[in-house]
Amino acid sequence: MSTNHFFVAASNIEGDRVQLNLEQAHQVHNVLRLKPGDAIVVLDDSGTEYDVVLTTVEPCQTLGRVRGERRAQGEPAVQVILFQSLLPREKFEWVLQKGTEVGVSQFVPVQTDRSLLRARMIEEKRLNRWRRILTEAAEQSHRGRVPTLEPAITFHEAISRLKDFCRSIIAAPSEEAAMLRDTLRNVAGSPASIALMIGPEGGFTDEEVARACEKGAVRISLGPRVMRTETAAVVTCALALYELGEMGV
Protein backbone atom coordinates (compact mmCIF):
# COMPACT_ATOMS: atom_id res chain seq x y z
CA MET A 1 0.00 0.00 0.00
CA SER A 2 1.35 3.44 -0.98
CA THR A 3 2.34 5.82 1.81
CA ASN A 4 0.28 9.02 1.97
CA HIS A 5 2.09 12.22 0.97
CA PHE A 6 1.41 15.70 2.37
CA PHE A 7 2.82 19.10 1.42
CA VAL A 8 3.32 21.41 4.40
CA ALA A 9 4.75 24.89 4.88
CA ALA A 10 8.48 24.84 5.65
CA SER A 11 7.68 26.53 8.96
CA ASN A 12 5.68 23.43 9.98
CA ILE A 13 8.93 21.44 10.13
CA GLU A 14 11.04 22.34 13.15
CA GLY A 15 13.97 20.03 13.76
CA ASP A 16 12.49 16.54 13.75
CA ARG A 17 8.97 17.76 14.64
CA VAL A 18 6.29 18.07 11.95
CA GLN A 19 2.81 19.54 12.26
CA LEU A 20 0.12 19.07 9.62
CA ASN A 21 -2.42 21.83 8.98
CA LEU A 22 -6.04 21.58 10.15
CA GLU A 23 -7.37 20.27 6.83
CA GLN A 24 -4.68 17.59 6.73
CA ALA A 25 -5.31 16.70 10.39
CA HIS A 26 -8.97 16.15 9.56
CA GLN A 27 -8.03 13.97 6.58
CA VAL A 28 -5.58 11.88 8.59
CA HIS A 29 -7.97 11.38 11.51
CA ASN A 30 -11.41 11.15 9.90
CA VAL A 31 -10.78 10.01 6.34
CA LEU A 32 -7.61 7.93 6.31
CA ARG A 33 -8.07 6.85 9.95
CA LEU A 34 -4.35 6.73 10.59
CA LYS A 35 -3.03 6.23 14.10
CA PRO A 36 0.11 7.10 16.10
CA GLY A 37 2.93 4.95 14.81
CA ASP A 38 1.71 5.02 11.20
CA ALA A 39 4.08 6.36 8.55
CA ILE A 40 3.51 9.23 6.13
CA VAL A 41 5.72 11.26 3.80
CA VAL A 42 5.89 15.04 4.23
CA LEU A 43 7.22 17.50 1.63
CA ASP A 44 8.13 21.16 2.04
CA ASP A 45 7.89 22.04 -1.69
CA SER A 46 11.66 22.40 -1.98
CA GLY A 47 12.27 19.01 -3.60
CA THR A 48 12.98 17.28 -0.28
CA GLU A 49 10.74 14.62 1.21
CA TYR A 50 10.69 13.46 4.82
CA ASP A 51 9.80 10.05 6.21
CA VAL A 52 7.58 10.79 9.21
CA VAL A 53 6.03 8.61 11.92
CA LEU A 54 2.85 10.01 13.45
CA THR A 55 3.01 10.76 17.16
CA THR A 56 -0.30 12.59 17.72
CA VAL A 57 -3.44 12.04 15.66
CA GLU A 58 -6.38 14.22 16.61
CA PRO A 59 -9.03 16.02 14.50
CA CYS A 60 -7.50 19.42 15.24
CA GLN A 61 -3.86 18.48 15.68
CA THR A 62 -1.66 15.93 13.96
CA LEU A 63 2.03 15.75 14.80
CA GLY A 64 4.86 13.55 13.62
CA ARG A 65 8.56 12.90 14.01
CA VAL A 66 11.04 12.90 11.11
CA ARG A 67 12.89 9.61 10.71
CA GLY A 68 14.81 10.45 7.55
CA GLU A 69 14.94 12.72 4.52
CA ARG A 70 15.98 12.51 0.87
CA ARG A 71 15.57 14.21 -2.46
CA ALA A 72 12.12 13.59 -3.88
CA GLN A 73 12.13 11.08 -6.72
CA GLY A 74 9.05 12.38 -8.52
CA GLU A 75 10.52 15.52 -10.11
CA PRO A 76 11.74 15.58 -13.73
CA ALA A 77 15.04 17.29 -14.43
CA VAL A 78 13.52 19.07 -17.43
CA GLN A 79 10.95 21.76 -16.72
CA VAL A 80 7.86 21.62 -18.91
CA ILE A 81 5.86 24.83 -18.87
CA LEU A 82 2.37 24.40 -20.28
CA PHE A 83 0.82 27.49 -21.87
CA GLN A 84 -2.75 26.19 -21.88
CA SER A 85 -5.51 28.16 -23.58
CA LEU A 86 -8.40 28.87 -21.25
CA LEU A 87 -11.06 26.15 -21.31
CA PRO A 88 -14.42 25.55 -19.62
CA ARG A 89 -13.90 24.86 -15.91
CA GLU A 90 -14.06 21.06 -15.78
CA LYS A 91 -11.77 20.62 -18.79
CA PHE A 92 -9.20 23.10 -17.52
CA GLU A 93 -9.18 21.50 -14.08
CA TRP A 94 -8.70 18.08 -15.69
CA VAL A 95 -5.62 19.42 -17.52
CA LEU A 96 -4.24 20.78 -14.23
CA GLN A 97 -4.73 17.47 -12.45
CA LYS A 98 -3.45 15.15 -15.15
CA GLY A 99 -0.67 17.49 -16.22
CA THR A 100 0.60 17.50 -12.65
CA GLU A 101 0.55 13.71 -12.53
CA VAL A 102 2.53 13.54 -15.78
CA GLY A 103 5.21 16.00 -14.61
CA VAL A 104 4.37 19.55 -15.73
CA SER A 105 6.34 22.13 -13.72
CA GLN A 106 4.28 25.24 -14.42
CA PHE A 107 0.87 26.10 -15.84
CA VAL A 108 0.18 29.39 -17.59
CA PRO A 109 -3.49 30.02 -18.57
CA VAL A 110 -3.67 31.90 -21.87
CA GLN A 111 -6.52 33.88 -23.40
CA THR A 112 -6.60 33.20 -27.14
CA ASP A 113 -8.87 34.41 -29.93
CA ARG A 114 -11.12 31.34 -29.63
CA SER A 115 -11.08 31.03 -25.84
CA LEU A 116 -14.62 30.89 -24.47
CA LEU A 117 -13.36 32.10 -21.10
CA ARG A 118 -11.71 35.51 -20.77
CA ALA A 119 -8.78 36.34 -18.50
CA ARG A 120 -10.76 38.97 -16.60
CA MET A 121 -13.24 36.26 -15.55
CA ILE A 122 -10.58 34.37 -13.56
CA GLU A 123 -11.12 35.62 -10.03
CA GLU A 124 -8.86 34.85 -7.06
CA LYS A 125 -11.37 32.31 -5.71
CA ARG A 126 -10.99 30.23 -8.85
CA LEU A 127 -7.19 30.50 -8.79
CA ASN A 128 -7.20 29.25 -5.19
CA ARG A 129 -9.34 26.28 -6.22
CA TRP A 130 -6.91 25.49 -9.05
CA ARG A 131 -3.97 25.66 -6.65
CA ARG A 132 -5.68 23.16 -4.35
CA ILE A 133 -6.16 20.82 -7.31
CA LEU A 134 -2.44 21.09 -8.10
CA THR A 135 -1.46 20.35 -4.50
CA GLU A 136 -3.73 17.32 -4.23
CA ALA A 137 -2.53 15.96 -7.57
CA ALA A 138 1.11 16.50 -6.56
CA GLU A 139 0.54 14.60 -3.32
CA GLN A 140 -1.27 11.76 -5.08
CA SER A 141 1.42 11.40 -7.75
CA HIS A 142 4.35 11.69 -5.30
CA ARG A 143 5.78 14.84 -6.83
CA GLY A 144 8.57 16.67 -5.00
CA ARG A 145 7.13 20.09 -5.74
CA VAL A 146 3.70 21.54 -6.40
CA PRO A 147 3.58 22.95 -9.95
CA THR A 148 3.23 26.71 -10.04
CA LEU A 149 0.16 28.40 -11.50
CA GLU A 150 0.35 31.87 -12.97
CA PRO A 151 -2.51 34.34 -13.44
CA ALA A 152 -4.09 34.23 -16.89
CA ILE A 153 -2.27 36.22 -19.58
CA THR A 154 -2.99 37.23 -23.16
CA PHE A 155 -1.64 35.37 -26.17
CA HIS A 156 0.62 38.34 -26.95
CA GLU A 157 2.09 38.16 -23.45
CA ALA A 158 2.56 34.40 -23.79
CA ILE A 159 4.54 34.49 -27.03
CA SER A 160 6.69 37.35 -25.74
CA ARG A 161 8.06 34.89 -23.19
CA LEU A 162 9.01 32.12 -25.62
CA LYS A 163 12.56 33.44 -25.95
CA ASP A 164 13.17 32.43 -22.31
CA PHE A 165 12.97 28.69 -23.09
CA CYS A 166 15.38 26.22 -24.62
CA ARG A 167 12.67 25.06 -27.01
CA SER A 168 9.16 26.38 -27.63
CA ILE A 169 6.50 24.26 -29.28
CA ILE A 170 3.00 25.08 -30.50
CA ALA A 171 0.54 22.27 -31.26
CA ALA A 172 -1.14 23.15 -34.55
CA PRO A 173 -1.62 20.31 -37.05
CA SER A 174 -0.80 21.01 -40.69
CA GLU A 175 1.07 19.41 -43.57
CA GLU A 176 4.10 21.55 -42.72
CA ALA A 177 4.07 20.70 -39.00
CA ALA A 178 6.96 18.69 -37.57
CA MET A 179 6.55 15.66 -35.34
CA LEU A 180 7.22 16.23 -31.66
CA ARG A 181 9.82 13.46 -31.57
CA ASP A 182 11.84 15.01 -34.38
CA THR A 183 11.64 18.46 -32.83
CA LEU A 184 13.03 17.31 -29.51
CA ARG A 185 15.66 15.05 -31.06
CA ASN A 186 17.13 18.07 -32.79
CA VAL A 187 17.82 19.70 -29.44
CA ALA A 188 21.49 19.42 -28.50
CA GLY A 189 21.71 17.83 -25.08
CA SER A 190 18.89 17.85 -22.57
CA PRO A 191 17.12 21.24 -22.43
CA ALA A 192 16.49 22.82 -19.06
CA SER A 193 13.03 24.08 -19.97
CA ILE A 194 10.47 23.58 -22.72
CA ALA A 195 7.39 25.68 -23.44
CA LEU A 196 4.37 23.84 -24.83
CA MET A 197 1.47 25.84 -26.25
CA ILE A 198 -1.91 24.12 -26.51
CA GLY A 199 -4.88 25.82 -28.14
CA PRO A 200 -8.53 26.13 -27.14
CA GLU A 201 -11.45 24.16 -28.50
CA GLY A 202 -11.21 24.86 -32.22
CA GLY A 203 -7.46 25.35 -32.06
CA PHE A 204 -5.25 28.37 -32.58
CA THR A 205 -6.02 30.74 -35.45
CA ASP A 206 -3.60 30.83 -38.38
CA GLU A 207 -2.52 34.30 -37.30
CA GLU A 208 -1.74 33.09 -33.77
CA VAL A 209 0.35 30.22 -35.08
CA ALA A 210 2.26 32.53 -37.40
CA ARG A 211 2.94 35.02 -34.60
CA ALA A 212 4.16 32.26 -32.27
CA CYS A 213 6.48 30.88 -34.95
CA GLU A 214 7.89 34.37 -35.54
CA LYS A 215 8.82 34.35 -31.84
CA GLY A 216 10.68 31.07 -32.19
CA ALA A 217 8.00 28.41 -31.62
CA VAL A 218 8.15 25.19 -33.65
CA ARG A 219 4.83 24.02 -35.08
CA ILE A 220 4.13 20.35 -34.37
CA SER A 221 1.53 17.74 -35.17
CA LEU A 222 0.45 14.93 -32.85
CA GLY A 223 -0.29 12.49 -35.65
CA PRO A 224 -3.25 11.51 -37.81
CA ARG A 225 -5.90 11.41 -35.09
CA VAL A 226 -7.69 14.54 -33.90
CA MET A 227 -7.63 14.96 -30.10
CA ARG A 228 -9.71 17.15 -27.86
CA THR A 229 -7.66 20.03 -26.53
CA GLU A 230 -7.55 18.69 -22.97
CA THR A 231 -6.34 15.32 -24.29
CA ALA A 232 -3.74 16.96 -26.51
CA ALA A 233 -2.38 18.93 -23.55
CA VAL A 234 -1.67 15.88 -21.41
CA VAL A 235 -0.47 13.71 -24.31
CA THR A 236 1.94 16.38 -25.54
CA CYS A 237 3.44 16.88 -22.09
CA ALA A 238 3.79 13.14 -21.53
CA LEU A 239 5.39 12.57 -24.93
CA ALA A 240 7.82 15.45 -24.46
CA LEU A 241 8.96 14.12 -21.09
CA TYR A 242 9.21 10.61 -22.51
CA GLU A 243 11.36 11.70 -25.46
CA LEU A 244 13.65 13.54 -23.04
CA GLY A 245 14.04 10.44 -20.88
CA GLU A 246 12.03 11.80 -17.97
CA MET A 247 9.30 9.16 -17.68
CA GLY A 248 11.50 6.40 -16.31
CA VAL A 249 10.33 3.86 -18.88
Image: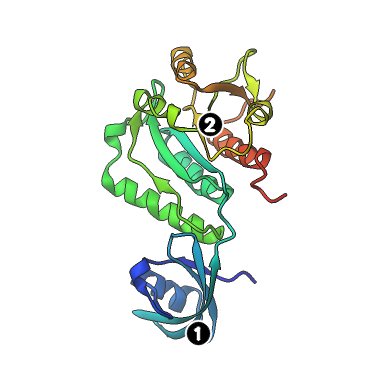
SS for tag 1?
A: loop
Front-most of residues 114 and 166: 166
Of residues 46 and 199, the one drawn nearer to the viewer in this rendering: 46
Residue kind at label 2, given as amino acid type:
Thr
Colour scheme employed for the rendering of this structure:
rainbow
Mark 1 and mark 2 in contact (Cβ < 8 Å)? no
Q: Residues within 10 Å of mark 2 (few under 14, many from 20)?
A: many
Tag 2 secondary structure: helix
* Rendered residue at 50%/84% (across/down): 35
Name which residue lies at 33% across and 46% down: 127
Residue 35, labelled with which disc? 1
Q: Position of residue 191 (x, y in %)?
A: 57, 37
Could you say which disc has been placed on residue 196 in the image? none
- Quarter occupied by residue 27: bottom left
User: Who is closer to the viewer here, 205 or 41?
Assistant: 41
Q: Position of residue 229 (x, y in %)?
A: 53, 31
Q: Quadrant of the N terminus?
A: bottom right
Q: Residue at the front extreme?
A: 188
Q: Which mark is residue 229?
A: 2
Work out whether mark 2 precedes mark 1 in sequence or the reverse, and give the earlier one.
1
* Residue 9 on image: x %, y %: 36, 66
User: What's the residue at 46%, 58% (across, down)?
Assistant: 136
* Residue, far right: 249
